[in-house]
Image (spheres, grey):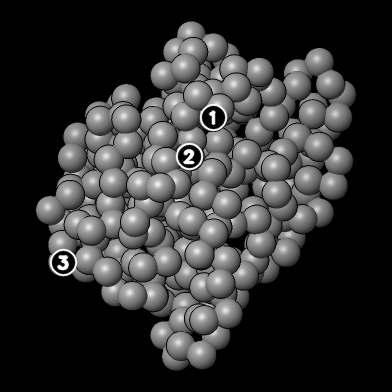
Amino acid sequence: MSNLLSAQGPRIVAIANQKGGVGKTTTAINLGAALVEQGCRVLLIDFDPQGNASTGLGIEPEDRQNTTYELMLDDAPLNEIIMRSQIENLDVVPATVDLSSADIELISNEKRSFLLHDALRQPAMEQYEYDFVLIDCPPSLNLLTVNAMVAAHSVLVPLQSEFFALEGLSQLMLTIREVRQSANPDLRIEGIVLTMYDSRNNLSQQVEEDARDNLGDLVFRTIIPRNVRVSEAPSFSMPVLEFDSNSKGAAAYRDLAREILTKYEAVAA
């Protein structure tokens, strides 16, 4: 399915929400694995200084010689940075805590918002024939997240099914609008995916109802349930699709991947 989506190169999706603990990294890892199952080639960019996406795909800290920091600030070539994960066709640009200082260093750079955009459009990118690039953003609306949005075609927003979930969304939407006006007019919202959903919980149902009432078709039909196997999988450095392929969490991420691909196939047709 290589370059199924576009002759222009991979579809770049920033996975963003300034709130922590909403399932960004979990979604990046498992959506990436689910897209690979559907025949795609995927690059996951770990853009969070905590480096959890790298760890969750089995990239040990001592093996992260070149990272997103070098990609953005040292113009390091892609072939020195991209690492293979344990899953075929799912590659990683890892992160370390070094990335936490990038925000300060970016301020004085006149191209500060475009560094990731330019790095992902190196001619060398073509040889990898990725269908998707997923960017796991940090839990803040800082210059790293802005870089991800300027580089991306779309933003996928994990929304935890909890009280105040929608309140934080307004600030994120404002940031997306500002990026559209200033640097990336084609940026759009890929969709909002409800995470950590407990169907027995009235609050989860209320959040879903509010989200669909307010955001309509932007909310994916697929819902990611609260599932212990999803929570356990990262400690074994693997996606839940590998850790427990038959779990509800694995099934949900497969559904999400199919929903995304079906949408692109409809547009292409």
Residue 201, image x, y percentages:
84, 21
Q: Residue at x 41, y 34 (%)?
A: 58
Q: Amino acid at mark 3?
A: Pro
Q: Is residue 48 visible?
A: yes
Viewer-closest of 29 and 168: 29
Vertical placement of residue 235 versus 115, above or below: above
Residue ID for mark 3 = 123
Secondary structure, mark 1, is helix
Which residue shows up at 66% across the image and 35% down it?
194
Residue 173 point in image, percent of width and height: 65, 62
Q: Residue furthest top?
A: 246
Please tell me in which quadrant of the rendered image residue 175 appears: bottom right
Query: For the point 85% across and 47% down, which residue is it?
Result: 164
Q: Crowding at label 2, few (<14), some or many (≥20) Cα neighbours within 10 Å?
A: some
Q: CA distance from mark 3 to mark 2?
A: 28 Å
Q: Which residue is mark 2?
A: 55
Residue 244, given in percent of the width and then of the height, sits at 49, 13
The residue type indicated by label 2 comes to: Thr
| Contact? badges 1 and 2 (CB < 8 Å) | yes
Residue 155 appears left or right of 164: left
Mark number for residue 234?
Answer: 1
